[in-house]
Image: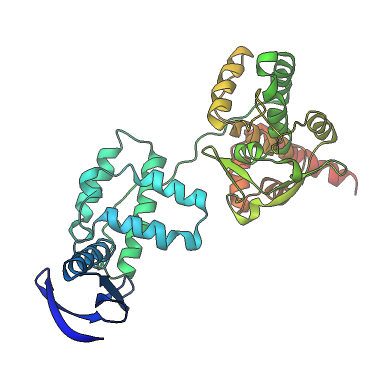
Amino acid sequence: MNNKMKIEVNGKQYTFRFNSSKLQFECNYGYKDNFGQRQSRIIKGKSVDELTENLKSTIRKIEDNNVLKETVTLKNFFEFYITNIAPIKNRKSTINNKINTIKNIPSHIWESRLCDITTIQLQLMFTSLQDKYSQNTIASLHEVLSTVLNQAVRYKIITTNPSKDCPVKSFKNGKKNYISLEETKTLLTFLKTTKQYNHYYLPVLFLAFTGCRIGECLGLQKDALDIKNNTVKIKSQVSAGVFYNVLKTDSSFRTIKVPAFVMQEISSNLTDSDFVFTNSKGNCIGYTAFRLAMKNIFKKCGLEYRSFKQFRNSYVKTAVLNGVPLKVIQNILGHSKLSTTADIYGELESEDTFYVANKMEQAYRTV
């Protein structure tokens, strides 16, 4: 290496040399990365002009990705958070939910510099969104935004989290919707005897008698079935039309016992597909198509459709009223917290819980 020379880029002088062995010009560019660590890159060019252009391009790319500069926007930092921070503690489905939630932020805040965003500005945003979104949507937005801004504080991009002092209504648990065993039988009979909707019979049967989530049901594959022992390993799901080998939480990975008559129906109708439940063309059933079909099917059966959680909630209710302990139900459903299971139980009508008194009386009389 010889012939040290200088070039000017963006008002700064950079030293470069000609590498006679490689017949190219080279410049060592030093910078700090997103963690404040010193880094360097060797920029190359066959001519001084090419070296200059390559150096300009490199500086531009590094600055665009440098979230430590004062001009970083909420959008810039959120992209950094999703790429570099969120995957450490969050599953892909959770990250997708955060991305979808943050889309509700107005563009004028989304494009604002982090250092310019104020608590008053965010409070006005949350208040204005009340006319457009539900209480839970706003609570979710506040939660995700607070998480992101807390990370910005940790990275010393801002000194305080402006959303910290914004009062927002907490999450509201909606009234649980149930479907009785009689209504379930009506629905299953209709599905089994109606050719147009016959391929929905098995997944509805599975949902009704296992309490599984809809994504777990649609993502169930044949290698998860143990037909001999009537068990199923819940280890995959379909979310937003994409198959995943990950579930909502670690406790969602579980093996459940399936009623023998349900397993018999399923095993007798397996196709060549890897998926247990398929549509009329033999492909994996899509969530949107399933939901739209179920709304129509419920209507034809004279039933009220709210969501697929009707089956899951009803499974809990039936189990509780038959004396199954909540801890057992929690494990079957794959809830990470017992309080989640208890929340469904808490929605039962008071007369539904009278069975406790009956059980206590039976226990007393047997003493």
- Residue 246, relative to residue 36: is it above or below? above
Residue 62 or residue 220, whichever sits in front: 62
Q: 106 or 160: which is nearer to us? A: 106
Kindly indicate the quadrant of the structure image that contains residue 242: top right
- In the image, residue 37 sits, relative to residue 68, either above or below, namely below
Image position of 260 with respect to 91: above or below: above
Compared across the picture, whether 243 is left or right of 102 comes to right
Q: Quadrant of residue 229?
A: top right
Residue at (50% x, 57% y) in the render: 90
Q: Nearer the viewer, residue 96 or 170?
A: 96
Whole-percent x, y for residue 322 in the image: 77, 38
Can the viewer see residue 30 in this picture? no
Q: Residue at x 34, y 55 (%)?
A: 79
Location of residue 109 in the rendering, given as x and y in whole percent from the top left corner: 23, 48
Task: Answer yes or no: is residue 281 visible.
Answer: yes
Q: Quadrant of residue 165?
A: bottom left
At x 49% / y 50%, what residue is drawn?
94
Q: Quadrant of the N terminus?
A: bottom left
Point out residue 72 in the picture as x, y percentages from the top left corner: 23, 60
Foreground residue among 50 and 305: 50
The residue lying furthest to the bottom in this view is 2
Q: Is residue 265 left or right of residue 278?
A: right
**Residue at the extreme left:** 11
Left or right: residue 366 versus residue 295 is right
